[in-house]
Amino acid sequence: MATCALPALANVKVEQILAASDAIRNPAVPFTINIQLTEYRNKKVEQEGYLSTYAKMNPERGQYDTLVRIVQPPRDTGKMMLKNGNEIWFYDPATKAGMRISPQQRLLGQASNGDVATVNLARDYRAELAGEETVADGERKPRNSYRLKLTANNASVSYHAIDYWVEQGTNRPIKAAFFSESGRLLKTAYYRRYESQLGQERPTETVIIDGVDPQRVTVMRYLNYQAKDIPDAWLERSGLAQVKD
């Protein structure tokens, strides 16, 4: 992996790069997708899950509100998570009980609650340009990329710091390394299998590798992108009981 001197990159607008990368991951219109989660250990499937998500930009917060409904596993069918800003609330329709949960808490495998919600990194992180590198993508192809160092603007986000590789020329997210406040590597993610979805080439798969045990891998597959008029009530805690298919 080759790194170039920073002075040659002085004119690069790092905030614009990060915002453009966000726009590739996140459609501008309200949308719904399904997420298939598969956890592997030593290349063998350990567990699987399936989610339906609904996301819409909240103009007041400058961040997405996201509703996540659990479809599988069967023991959790119908349970929901609601992300408002950087707060995540869990709701069980069977008991009508709700509680606030951490975005860092694991949902399945290496995927945390915050990982399955739509996130605007440019809003929550301060970005610095760390260099220009040729990095292998999720399909082991070399990509000329900018490496950005992202530092959290507040303590309520999922990760304290992120190293984030964005392809030059396309602004596609290629790879991310997520760190705790102590500097420990928590996980590494690769964004891959780009397809045209809602007017943009977007990654339809994220591969997440555990920071301690690389044999623990979780694959998130994004299926059935659709633009959808999402009722505002669905994205409020008081309206979760009204959510229907």
Image (cartoon, rainbow, N blue to C red):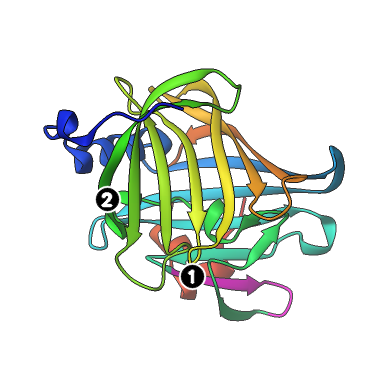
Horizontal arrangement in the rendering, residue 41 relative to residue 101 (left or right): right
Give the SS element for disc 1: loop
Residue at the image position 76 percent from the left and 59 percent from the top:
77
Residue at the image position 40 percent from the left and 26 percent from the top:
2
- Residue 97: x, y in percent? 64, 81
Residue at the image position 73 percent from the left and 54 percent from the top:
109
Between residues 118 and 20, which one lies in front from this camera angle? Answer: 20
Q: Is residue 55 visible?
A: yes
- Residue 43: x, y in percent? 84, 37
The span shown in magenta is 87-95
Which amino acid does the dot numbered 2 rest on? Answer: Ala
Q: Which mark is residue 182?
A: 1
- Residue 220: x, y in percent? 64, 41
Q: Residue 200 magenta-drawn?
A: no
Query: Magenta region's main secondary structure?
Result: strand
Horizontal arrangement in the rendering, residue 231 relative to residue 99 (left or right): left
Between residues 125 and 29, which one lies in front from this camera angle? Answer: 125
| Quadrant of residue 201 within the rendered picture | top left
Which amino acid does the dot numbered 1 rest on? Answer: Ser
Q: Nearer the viewer, mark 1 or mark 2?
A: 1
Q: Which mark is residue 127?
A: 2
Q: Earlier in the sequence, mark 1 or mark 2?
A: 2
Q: Real-space Cα distance between discs 1 and 2?
A: 19 Å
